[in-house]
Image: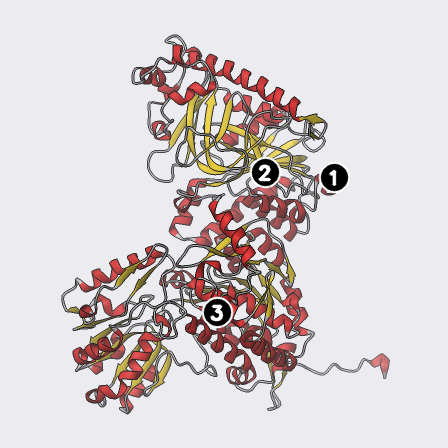
Amino acid sequence: MPAEGVCRLLFLDRYSPLPPHLLPANTLPMITLHPLRWGKQYESLEFNDVVHFDTGAPIARVGTVGGGIVTRDLQKAHLAREALLKVPTDELIAMGKKAAELFEHGTLSVGDSQQSVDDFVHQQSASTGLPEHMCRSNMAKNSFVLSRMDEILQCLTRGLDLSILSKGYGDEGRGVTVSYQAQTPILGAILPNNSPGVHTLWLPAVALQIGLALKPGSQEPWTPYRMVSAFMEAGVPAAAFGLYPGGHDAGGAIMTKAPRSMIFGSAQTVAQHSGNPRVQAHGPGFSKILLGDDIVDDWEMYLDVMVESVLSNSGRSCINCSGIWASRHTREIAAAIAEKIGPVNVLPPADPNAQLAAFTVPAMATGTWSMVEQDLAENGVTDMTAEYGEKLIERDHCAYLRPMVVHADSPDRAVTAKEYMFPFVSVVECPQDQMLRRIGPTLVGTVITADEPFITGASRSVDIDRLNIGPLPTNRLNWLQPHEGNIIDFLFRNRAYQIAPMPTAASTV
Amino acid sequence: MSVVGEVSEAEIQAAATAARDRLNEHTLKTVHWHFSDETGCPFWLEKKSELNFDPLKDVKSFDDLKKFPHFEDEWLRGGPIRRWVPKGHAGKPVYVFETGGTTGIPKSRMVIEDHWKDYELFSDTLPDKYFPRGANWLMLGPSGPRRLRLAVEHLAQHRDGICFCIDLDPRWVVKLIKKGWMEHLEEYKKHCIDQAVTILTAGHDVKCMFATPKLLESLSEALEEKGTSLAEVGITGIFSGGTEFTSQWTRFCVEEMLGGLPEESGIYMTPTYGNTLMGLACSKPITSTDGYKIAYYAPQPRAVTEVVTFDDYDQVVGYGETGRVKLYTLTDEFFVPGFMERDEGERERPFQTYPWDGVSGVRPFHELASATTVGVY
């Protein structure tokens, strides 16, 4: 079989004297990743290949498990928490800092290989189609969050003594008993294929002495595997970690059996889990920038903020800006952004100037392009990047979509509620007094204004999750703030806990 | 000369040649039955006029079946069902079994006694130690117009037992999946498993069962949640089937769910592969030393499986090579001269028990996999 032949050749290439970054894209070292069952490697009889996005050549074999194994392991999930509870939280935080260092700079045992930072970056870029400098940037982001976990938890818990989370109750210092009861021994997570930056969301679990049952994305197993390896190398008990690569069956078992889990997916995925207290669903962000009437005449001052918000991380994140709303100058604003991002073209992933990630499933790009064409067909919608050439670039094994800026003359246009997996933004003409009523769900809302009533309105809007007041790019998150809900509230429940001293028994007097 | 166990390759080759001779003879007999005006069914007698050869004269061996166009299962959609009943069986009671049927008209196959015969042959492969004669059975699989449900009941009766069944509508399960009603799906699964647990804990002396892999998993979990197990409720023999039946699942089932191989756990589990068209293919005994490899062997000469190349469905692949599974059904009730199954796998060598080709690693055919909903119950 040809595929097997390629695998064997690649396996031999592991011993090539050339460093990985000098190897041609189709000869990356082959790596085998095994499921991890509460710290114990499990050698599955079934494997999925992870392939290079541009050549289709396999770069990793990932052993998979079915739902039965996940279900069986989750019956013992309490052991993961018990293992973590044996390590004080301050020690776990210190281990996390060490893990952050190892993750970002070390060579780690990952699967059957020793993985350097460069190996990781090449592998992640090769399977996700993300430019290498973006892989490094996401790596730094994950490491940064982990290294600041003490500050993050202090903020998320509002200064709670973390031993109260371990013990379940304690005295906060006001003479009142407070109790935070863990709602789950482990956090399950169905991780995405193409967004290496989102892993920051499950990282706090370890310091909170909550184990992890992770289903790595089929094209991006790299971050969870490397991160778990770093945690274990730093001394965190291996029994706290489960890595369950597999199909829907494995993911379904995590979702069904873990009392708390997070999932990353589409708007449909989010809707499916809406209202389920056991599931935190992360999907499209529909993040936006709103320009107040008081500053919109000076919009050029905020052009860089807008461009960064749209273009960073190849527009793949839920925190990328998909809508810029203003009451006037919208055509000029759209044209100026188009002038900046319209010429951006496909570059090799190792090129430090590469701005675009590939769609590793070409049909996703062609499908997206069809939807964009529908959007453009509506009256009142103008493609402001039309003059910058073809948008859909199709290759043998992948495809790209080049950046687009569209102008919508009214919030009534369907495109104003769209978000796509490439740099795509609609600049929407809308009176300020209608904006907050019309924007719809907005994960990150950057409101650039000094108009106090507008700020008050934005502060009160329940459509906006993360609110930035002032010229803050939507992609720049302050990790000391909660993201799509506070993970402490998700994993713990604040409840009453009363203690009365026991009377002394008469017989002991 | 190398020796496989106590049987030499030459002996296996001789047995394979003899089996091939029997298959050729059986093919000739079956084709004559189905294409003779006195015994054939209206469908094939009508089809005969469309063929550019005379089946009665030009089919002299199994290989000659390749002269027929591939069997199209779409022919089975809609009626009249009587067009499939051979005149030679006129007057006998007829069953109809359906496949699929979530939307539109389901495919249907008429059966008289084939399902009994297939399962009686299968019965001969079951070890009495783990499938004791006289023990009662649980059928933990689809109910309704399904061949499997009546076949398993017959198997139980053939082995002097009584079969307990549950209500399970796989068409509703497929609808739940398509609608994305996963909570309902979970509840429906619980509803099915509750029925099984009730039967197994009601003192009915059930020792043997059929279950699909997913339902077996769920049953085992439900019993464990009640503080008991398959072994504790008395199960000693399980036969199971489904496309999701992989080596990895078998390993999990044997090592973790059942608690070891039969000598250790006291439970024998055998995989099977089948469908309404062909019947039931048995598995070569599974062993941990063989990596829990599952190799299926059709009940030749009543049915035959081939593994054929993806670009030429008349060309068999080499041993160990991958191809699409092609089925033939050659009974006096039903004639299928080559049906392209929706599965692929690797061609396996004959061995002592089944001296003809088998197929291993069965999985959904890669070109159709994304459109196929597997393992729905």
Which chain hosts label 1? B
Question: Which percent across, then down, holds residue B369?
Answer: 42, 44
Are tags 3 and 2 found on a single chain?
no
Q: Badge 1 is on which residue?
A: B263
Q: Badge 2 is on which residue?
A: B294
Q: B183 above or below A350?
A: above
Q: Secondary structure at mark 1?
A: helix
Which chain hosts label 2? B
In front of the other: label 3 or label 1? 3
What residue is drawn where x is 31% and y is 83%? A305
Cα gap from disc 3 to disc 1, whole angstroms: 49 Å
Cα gap from disc 2 to disc 1, whole angstroms: 19 Å
Q: Secondary structure at mark 2?
A: loop
Q: Amino acid at mark 3?
A: Val
Q: A405 above or below B143?
A: below
Q: Amino acid at mark 1?
A: Glu
Are tags 2 and 1 found on a single chain?
yes
Q: Quadrant of the C terminus of chain A?
A: bottom right
Q: Is residue B243 left or right of residue A502?
A: left
Q: Amino acid at mark 2?
A: Ile
Instruction: Characterize the local packing of mark 1: few (<14), some (14-19) or many (20 or more) Cα atoms within 10 angstroms.
Output: few
Q: A378 above or below A44?
A: below
Are tags 3 and 1 found on a single chain?
no
Question: Which percent across, then down, holds residue B359?
Answer: 53, 34
Q: Badge 3 is on which residue?
A: A121
Cα gap from disc 3 to disc 2, whole angstroms: 39 Å
